[in-house]
Each structure stands twice: as C-alpha cells, then as structure tokens.
C-alpha cells in the first residue's frame, strides 16, 4: 500500500467499494485536527482485506460532542496535543506552573469524560499523545513532552478493555517525520499529516480491526529450506544448515523460530509443508541442537514430494479450518506464485531475498494476521476493575456532557457594528459553510455599509471559556424594516458548535436587538443541512417556502428563551480592546 | 499531463472524468470544497513530484489555474 500514490488509492478504493459485499463495518473518526484523508486510506486498507469498511468523519474539534452521538460505530480518536489549545507548542514554555497544571487537568477531565462516553463502544482506537513533531530537537524533555507523557500515563490508567491504545511514535519512526508531517497544511488548514503517514497508520491499526472482526488466521505453515533454516537440506546436507544465533547467516532464522514459538504459545497452530524426505526433517526436529521448533510444537506435517497445493488442501481438511485461515511461508518464487494463483484463499508470505529482512517482516506482517491482542486482553482483565472504578469516579466528577460544558464557564462577548472586525466578519461570510443559515457572501464594502448604516445591526461574537479565547467565531446581520427585524445572516464557526452557544446567541439577538416581530430565512446550500430546522426548533412559524428558501417569523412575546442555558454568560465587549496578540 | 490532471481531479472530487472540463471551478463543481482542495494538492504533488507553496495553493482555483501552476513547477 505504501507504494500506491494517493490518487491511485482513491481510485482503487472506489472500485473496491463497488466490488465488496457484506454487512458494512461503520467506523467513525473523532478528531481535533483535520484528518479527512484518513477516511479513504483506512477504508482501502480494510477493504483489501475483505472488510466492507465505511469510514465517517466527525466534526472538526468536536471529539466530546461527537462521542455523545455515536450510534454503533467503531471509533478512531485523533486527539492532537498541539491543537488542544491554539499554538500550544509555541506557548507552553511560557506557561506558569499553574497554567500548565490547569490545562493538564482540564484535558484529563475531558479524557475521563470521553472514556465514560465510550464505555459502550465495543472497539476504540485511541492514539496516545505525542509531542515528537514539535520537539524533536531537544535533548531535555520540553513541557509539551511532559504534558504528553503525563496525559498518556493517565490514559493508560483509565482506559478500559475496549480501548486500544496506539503509539504514533512508532508510525513516525517507521516513515520519518519529514514524510509524516505537513506544517504548510497544518498552519493553513489544521491538516497535520501527509498521506504517507495515514497509509502507515492504517497498516498499523488495520490488524486490530481484523482481530476484532474475527478475521484472523489460525494456522501458520512453514516450508523448511530457507524458511526455517538457511540452506537446502537435500543439497547442502544437514551440517551446512544454519539456524543458530551465533552464526551470522543463522541469526534471522533463529529469530523467526523464536517468534514462531511465541505465536505457538498464543495458540496459533504451527505446521510444515515442504518438499523433502520426511525422515531427514524428523531427524532435524529431534536432534539438531539449534532447532527451537520441535515436533511437540507442530500440529501437522506434510513433508513429502507431493505438490504443495494438494498438501495445503489436506492440511486445511485435517485441521478442519478454512483455507483462508492458513498463512503459508515459503522462499521459492515458483511455489509462492503457484499457490497465489491456485489457492488464492491461502495467504502466502515470501521470505525476503535478503534474509536479514526476514524477522522484521515476520514481526510486522505475519504476527498481524493472527490475534496479537490475546496477551493484551489478558493484561486488560485488570481493566475491568478499572472500568468499574472509573464509573464510580465519574459520578463525582462530570457525569454528563452537559455537566462538563457547565463547568467550562462559557462567555459570549458581543461586538456591535465594530469597524475593527470588518476583515474577520467578511472572511466569516466567505468561508463559513456548515452553520450558515443563508450563506450570503459579503465583500468588505458591503460589510462597511452594514456597519455604518442605522438600518442594520452587525453583531459579531467572541467566545471564551475558563481555559481560553476561541476568537471571533459567530456573526449575525440584522436589518430593521418598518414591519420588524429581519435576520439577514446568522453563522457560526464549526469549532464552537456543539456547546449550545448557537441557541444562546439566538436568544440574545431576540432579547437585545429585536423589535416586536422577527423574520428569518433559511436558504439551503449543499453544505448547511445541519441547520435546516434551526428556526423551527427555536419555535418560529414557517410562513412561506420558495425553492430552497424557507421564510419564518415569530413575535418577541411568543419566543421562548432557552432557560437551561443560564450557565452561558453574555457580555458586551469593545473590539478595540481585543487582540492582545494571543487570541486568534 | 492535462489528461492525467483531469483523471486525478475526477477521483479526488468523486465525479466522472467527463465532468472535469477546461472550465471547471469550485463554483461549477459542488464537490470542490476546501477539504477536497487539500486532497487535490496532495494528489497532484504526489503524482508529479512537485511541491506548491501556500499562495499557489490558495490561487489554484480552476482547472486552468491548476494546469498553469503545475506547468510552472515542471518547467523550473
């Protein structure tokens, strides 16, 4: 998969989607950065293994909110430490101890809440935090490193058995940071990773999905010559065979034998399928001092001069497993190609021509076909107790998302007709797609007219909570007509959606800025489905529907404020006092 | 090169390749949104072994401009 170009992967993924059948496996990615390319890459990596995966992306920076709304999906979590606060890697070393502690404990309580919300999800891939992309040059751990390790320690303590922890550092190590990270797209679009990273990552987590879906192999069958040992028994003779760790040529084979025994210990069935004289091989199994795999480890032996196709068929029959449960290892081009052609259900691995690559390939590839999570699960038995403990604990802390949001001390700051904010307000009308009721794009000149005119009121909002400033993230343009006030535009940046700020903003528009009758419009675009019923939900009456526009109205006395949102404060601000250089 | 660009755009934007024409822009093609724009850039860089800078990426907002910037890269 690594050699596949990104556009080729997109095309192949589409082909696979049409070819593959079966109950779809729904996977949802929750993230606080943009990782949208992972969708196709992960789908592809699972689909080529016969898993009809459908991957969906959560909203940007809405991990907790999306976790509440999970249906039946498996979950992947990309929680990027550098974006838990804007510009964190560059600011964290300026933090006081107090600020550092406060932020760390905030994230910890979010982790607790998230793990709570994920309790019923059968399978979660949770990436451990990594500071490596931002701190690779330091000899001493930076504060970001410290925070990452402290959070990881916490996650390891709290994670229940359904949470599969993944180290991104291993992925970075395998492809190198330069291939993994794209700072250009990170600064412009919060898209931190390159396609190569996603490909490697998908390869890294795909076996875990396979295991959880029961798509694992059961038997590992070896050829003998140049597979269990270096050399050809029938030609070189037994004394020339090498499989000892004390001889350079033997090292890779010694390593593979150890790894095979490890799989045996986990319950994998080991066997032989080789063209050799059976008594010669038996002799080695019983008497060769360097052999680690012995007769007692082998559940089946097909050592004869029969073709390997028949032998493998018989092995499957005798073990009473499907051919698709067999992984076969051989060194010969001829045998490997023959089996791939004649028995495509059998997975074949070819021993690399350079033998030193063999153990690594074995570890990365072969082991992944079996259930490498067996020991993990055993280890996780203690996790059950922890799960119980976490439940008890969270009752005292944040039981629900609402409790959590309450604790954030959210504040909406209103900026009326602020000329200082014209650039930002224009940008918001141009760029906001999802939470945008009318999607009217305005130029700077138009915006200036609205700001200056008495017939209009332009209200921008900033959102703060006890952990920081989210910047100017919402906008309403109101037009005053003799018959009432018209909400010309209402939009909010997606990064603050999911905290009921939108309702509080609407409450405020109506209580602070409206005359007796309020008119509002929803205009459908290709991207704003999420707000289709916004005004309806707020109690407005639909008065007219023309093409893609719905026109609503309500009287001020009829409108019911969202009384439960009393925990969101609303204050007036001055735009000229903003911009201390720290906010967005 | 033009044909390959059209193919790449079609697979990135998930449309049939005959939907990509000389006049394709984000306005004419609904699926050409800001996220898929990043995918397009990444796919082109991967396919043609080039690297665009931020301004070029921001300006690459029509089929013709894509070809223009790509040719500029290739001739350097």
Image (spheres, coloured by chain):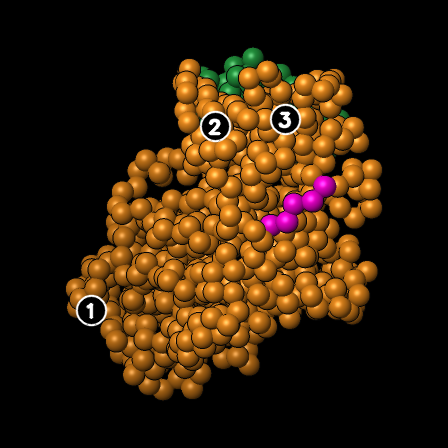
Chain colours: A orange, B green
The majority secondary structure of the magenta stretch comes to: strand
Q: Nearer the viewer, residue A501 or A122?
A: A501
Please tell me whether residue A108 belongs to the stretch shown in magenta. no
Residue at 51% x, 41% y is: A561
Q: Earlier in the sequence, mark 2 or mark 1?
A: 1
Q: Picture coordinates of residue A569 (x, y %)?
A: 64, 49
Question: Mark 1 Cα within 10 Å, few/some/many (few <14, many 20+)?
Answer: few
Q: Which residue is mark 2?
A: A554
Q: Residue at x 32, y 75 (%)?
A: A267
**Pointer 2 chain:** A
Q: In the rendered structure, does residue A571 fall within the stretch colored magenta? A: yes
Residue A477's label in the rendered image is 3
Distance (Cα) linking label 2 and label 3? 17 Å
Query: Which of the two residues, B50 or A474, is positioned nearer the viewer here?
Result: A474
Q: Which residue is mark 1?
A: A319
Labels 2 and 3 in the same subunit:
yes
Give the structural element (helix, strand or loop) at label 2. strand
In this view of the protein, which residue sits in the foreground, B30 or A406? A406
- Residue A277 picture location, percent across and down: 27, 72
- Say which of marks 2 and 1 sits in front: 2
Residue A388 in view: yes
Query: Which region shows up in magenta?
Result: A568-572
């Amino acid at each position: 998969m690594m050699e596949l170009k990104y556009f080729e992967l997109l095309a192949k993924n589409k082909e696979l989607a049409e070819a593959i059948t079966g109950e779809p496996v729904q996977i949802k990615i929750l993230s606080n950065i943009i990782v949208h390319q992972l969708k196709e890459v992960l789908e592809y990596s699972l689909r080529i293994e016969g898993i009809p995966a459908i991957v969906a992306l959560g909203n940007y920076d809405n991990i907790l909110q999306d976790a509440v709304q999970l249906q039946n999906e498996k979950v992947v979590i990309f929680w990027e430490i550098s974006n838990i606060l804007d510009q964190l890697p560059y600011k964290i070393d300026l933090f006081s101890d107090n600020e550092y502690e406060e932020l760390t404990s905030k994230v910890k309580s979010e982790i607790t809440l998230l793990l709570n919300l994920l309790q019923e999800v059968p399978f979660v891939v949770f990436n451990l935090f990594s500071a490596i992309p931002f701190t690779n040059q330091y000899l001493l751990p930076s504060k970001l490193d410290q925070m990452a390790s402290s959070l990881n320690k916490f996650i390891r303590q709290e994670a229940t058995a359904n949470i599969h922890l993944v180290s991104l550092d291993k992925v970075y190590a395998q492809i190198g940071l330069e291939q993994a990270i794209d700072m250009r797209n990170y600064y412009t679009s919060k898209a931190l990773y390159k396609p190569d990273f996603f490909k490697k990552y998908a390869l890294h987590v795909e076996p875990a999905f396979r295991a959880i879906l029961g798509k694992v192999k059961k038997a590992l069958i070896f050829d003998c010559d140049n597979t269990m040992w270096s050399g050809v028994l029938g030609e070189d003779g037994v004394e020339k065979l090498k499989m000892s760790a004390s001889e350079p040529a033997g090292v890779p084979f010694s390593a593979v034998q150890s790894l095979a025994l490890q799989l045996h210990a986990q319950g994998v069935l080991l066997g032989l399928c080789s063209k050799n004289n059976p008594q010669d091989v038996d002799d080695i199994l019983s008497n060769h001092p360097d052999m680690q795999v012995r007769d007692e480890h082998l559940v089946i032996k097909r050592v004869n001069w029969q073709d390997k196709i028949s032998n493998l068929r018989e092995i499957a029959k005798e073990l009473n497993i499907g051919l698709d449960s067999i992984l076969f290892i051989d060194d010969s081009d001829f045998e490997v190609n023959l089996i791939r052609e004649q028995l495509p259900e059998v997975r074949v691995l070819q021993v690399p021509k350079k033998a030193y690559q063999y153990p690594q390939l074995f570890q990365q590839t072969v082991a992944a076909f079996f259930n490498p999570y067996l020991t993990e699960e055993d280890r996780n038995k203690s996790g059950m107790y922890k799960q119980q403990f976490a439940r008890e604990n969270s009752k005292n802390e944040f039981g629900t998302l609402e409790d959590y949001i309450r604790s954030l001390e959210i504040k909406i700051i209103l900026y009326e007709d602020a000329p200082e904010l014209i650039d930002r307000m224009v940008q918001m009308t141009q760029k906001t797609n999802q939470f945008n009721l009318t999607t009217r794009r305005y130029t700077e000149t138009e915006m200036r007219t609205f700001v200056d005119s008495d017939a209009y009121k332009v209200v921008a909002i900033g959102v703060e909570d006890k952990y920081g400033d989210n910047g100017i993230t919402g906008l309403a343009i109101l037009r005053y007509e003799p018959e009432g006030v018209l909400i010309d535009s209402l939009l909010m940046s997606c990064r603050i959606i999911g905290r009921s700020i939108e309702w509080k903003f609407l409450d405020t528009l109506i209580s602070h800025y409206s005359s007796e009758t309020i008119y509002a419009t929803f205009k459908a675009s290709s991207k704003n489905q999420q707000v289709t019923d916004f005004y309806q939900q707020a109690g407005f009456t639909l008065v007219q529907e023309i093409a893609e526009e719905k026109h609503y109205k309500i009287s001020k006395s009829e409108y019911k404020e969202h009384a439960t949102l009393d925990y969101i404060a609303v204050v007036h601000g001055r735009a000229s006092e903003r911009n201390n250089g720290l906010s967005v | 090169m033009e044909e390959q660009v059209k193919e790449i755009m079609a697979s990135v934007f998930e449309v049939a390749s005959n939907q990509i024409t000389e006049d394709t822009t984000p306005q004419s093609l609904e699926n050409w949104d800001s996220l898929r724009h990043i995918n397009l850039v990444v796919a082109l860089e991967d396919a043609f072994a080039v690297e665009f800078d931020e301004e070029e990426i921001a300006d690459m907002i029509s089929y013709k401009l894509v070809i223009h910037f790509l040719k500029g890269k290739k001739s350097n």
